[in-house]
Image: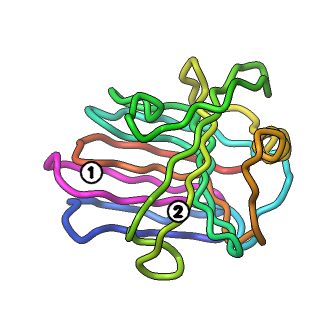
Amino acid sequence: YFWSSWTDGKAKITQNNGADGKFSVKWSGDNGNFVIGKGWQTGSSRYVVYSGEFNPIGNAYLAVYGWTTNPLVEYYIIEAYGNHNPSNNTEAKIKGNMTSDGGTYEIMTKQRVNKPSIQGTATFAQFWSIRTTNRVGGTVTTGNHFKAWADAGLKMGRHNYMIVAIEGQDSTGNATVTVG
């Protein structure tokens, strides 16, 4: 599996890239932002099977997460979140709902201006599917989300990496995830 670890330098994190699809992360200090996860060097329509534990105090996400280029897009399929639903944001444009893998997801998009990306500081769109009831473990049929986004007029580009990720924002917590 492809391993990805990004931090803004402020987050206090202890991470462990385990065997096969397993990884864990502990974070503390209610400061800083990180995204850590395991998956595939090139994203695609596939069944992403994962299991684990996710124990955030504050704002954090468990998601299938990735990027495309041309256009540059950062995307999230949120399976579980801490105390903040990302759709509760003045900049969020809600694009409807979709059903997949036994749950309902809210679709939204947001513009990011001069923010970190896989191509350095850039301006780009974020696409989100947010599961309306948190779950930790199951199958994510990524193609269903990609199709729903396209149907909502959200155009993806060429796939870069795609991972099952833990993201923490100014929060504390711990997580252990196994992909596959």
What amino acid is found at the position of numbered circle 1 in the picture? Answer: Trp
Compared with 10, 96 (above or below) is above
Number of disc labels: 2
Magenta residues, as a range? 21-37
Any mark on residue 18, and which? 2
Image quarter for residue 114? bottom left
Residue 1 in sight in this render: no
19 relative position to 176: left or right: right
Of 90 and 28, the residue lying toward us:
90
Compared with 92, 45 (above or below) is below
State the SS at label 2: loop
Residue 5 lies, in percent from the top left, at: 45, 69
180 relative position to 17: left or right: right
Residue 158 lies, in percent from the top left, at: 78, 72
Residue 25 belongs to magenta span: yes
Residue 115 lies, in percent from the top left, at: 39, 68
- Residue denoted by label 1: 27
Crowd rating for badge 2 (residues with CA inside 10 Å; few <14, some 14–19, many 20+): few
Compared with 117, 138 (above or below) is above
Q: Name the residue: 32% across, 37% down.
A: 59
Residue 54 in sight in this render: yes
Q: Earlier in the sequence, mark 1 or mark 2?
A: 2
What amino acid is found at the position of numbered circle 2 in the picture? Answer: Gly
Q: Quadrant of the N terminus?
A: bottom right
Q: Name the residue: 76% across, 36% down.
A: 139
